[in-house]
Amino acid sequence: MTIQENISLKKYNTFGIDVTAKRFISVDSVYQLQQLLKVEKNIFLISGGSNMLLTKDIEKLVVHINIKGISIDSEDENNVYLTVNAGENWHEFVLWCVGNNYGGIENLSLIPGNVGTCPIQNIGAYGVEVKDTITKVEALEINSGKLVEFSNDDCKFGYRNSIFKNEVKGKYIITSVSFQLTKNNHLLNTSYGAIETELASKEIKKPTLKDISDAVIAIRKSKLPDPKEIGNSGSFFKNPIISKKQFFGIQKEYPKIPSYAVSDSEIKVPAGWLIEQAGFKGKRFGDYGVHTKQALVLVNYGNASGKEIHQLAQKIQEIILQKFGITLEIEVNVIS
Ligand code: EPU
């Protein structure tokens, strides 16, 4: 466990932003982390780096969470109970589950990032949210160095949201996440239109976990940029939830606006659609821009700065507010 100096964080964030960590350390056990916290509490955490936009050099000690390991806690006839350490790569974990016929997270294939950060924003895709499989989250309290358990309820999960983005933000380091997955009678979720189409194109009528995972991978590859090729952080904004009244007003002018019902009074609209209507889809400015195939994704073509991308995001927010009267909320964690 050695502290390195002046390390570029480019390869530690999926946006590929080249900022410098004045001091950097990678930890691979909870014990190491506890030892570190005894001497240094003013830290900046980085894990998979898949949901952050770095806009400046980091003065705090950057702590890279690299704690690996998957363990099976118990099994019964229908379920398996697993604990996965924070530094495990999310997609590799999903593939491992699919390979072992453990069901529940196959729709979340190919999401960048690590297991430890999946509860923070309650990752979700194609009709599934990770909250439905999480039984508990273990975390170190930075102040006391003590390990604390958060039950699923304690996590206060919501759409791209949890307690870790709110009440306890910055106070804990997630060290492991526990899951309950199915061993048989899997509750397959194929209702998302694109999955149905993908399965139908392959004439698959009784999909396995692997069929669904493969379908999701194909869909994601067709519209989302691979961070190894084009820097990005997935959806940059949340899909806004607006009142039905406001929605019907917009629908009068734009009859094709897509929507998802949320409650009796509210409707969620895809931010990607709004951004496309505002003319930003595929727009490139120097080394940054809006992805050509999914307007919700901002991209770094090489050497963009975090500030440039943040300014573009603010411009998009301004235009969407003017055009639709909707405030887009940034989903990615902007470090400024
Ligand atoms: N749309 C457009 N133009 C665009 C993008 C989307 O018109 O440029 C329209 C689509 O035609 C479709 C609707 O918007 O009618 C929804 O698009 P899509 O299915 O691609 O999903 P999304 O709502 O844009 C959300 C998540 C994604 C997740 C997909 C699939 C959020 C913020 N994003 O995107 O999550 O993969 O659904 O479930 O909820 C992420 O969080 O990083 C992420 C990629």
Image: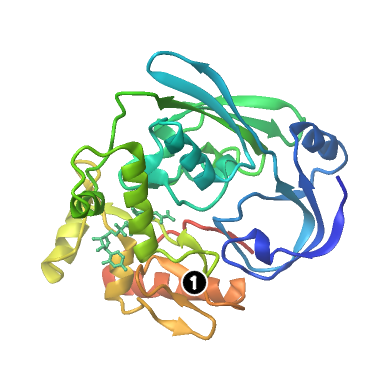
Q: Which residue is mark 1?
A: 299
Decide which of 46, 275 is in the foreground and name it.
46
Q: Position of residue 111 (x, y in %)?
A: 46, 51
> Quarter of the image holding residue 281?
bottom left
Q: Quadrant of the N terminus?
A: top right
Q: Amino acid at mark 1?
A: Val
Is residue 172 shown left or right of residue 308? Answer: right
Ligand 1 within 8 angstroms of badge 1 C-beta: no
Residue 123's place in the image compared with 78, above or below, is below
Residue at 61% x, 51% y is: 48
Residue at 68%, 71% in the rendered image? 18
- Compared across the picture, whether 125 is left or right of 4 comes to left
SS class, disc 1: strand
Residue at figure coordinates x 64%, y 42% from the top left: 87
Q: Quadrant of ligand 1?
A: bottom left
- In the depicted structure, whether residue 240 falls above or below residue 114: below
Dot 1 crowding, Cα within 10 Å, few <14, some 14–19, many 20+: many
Where on the picture, by quarter, is residue 16? bottom right
In the rendered structure, the answer to whether residue 183 lies left or right of residue 52 reads left
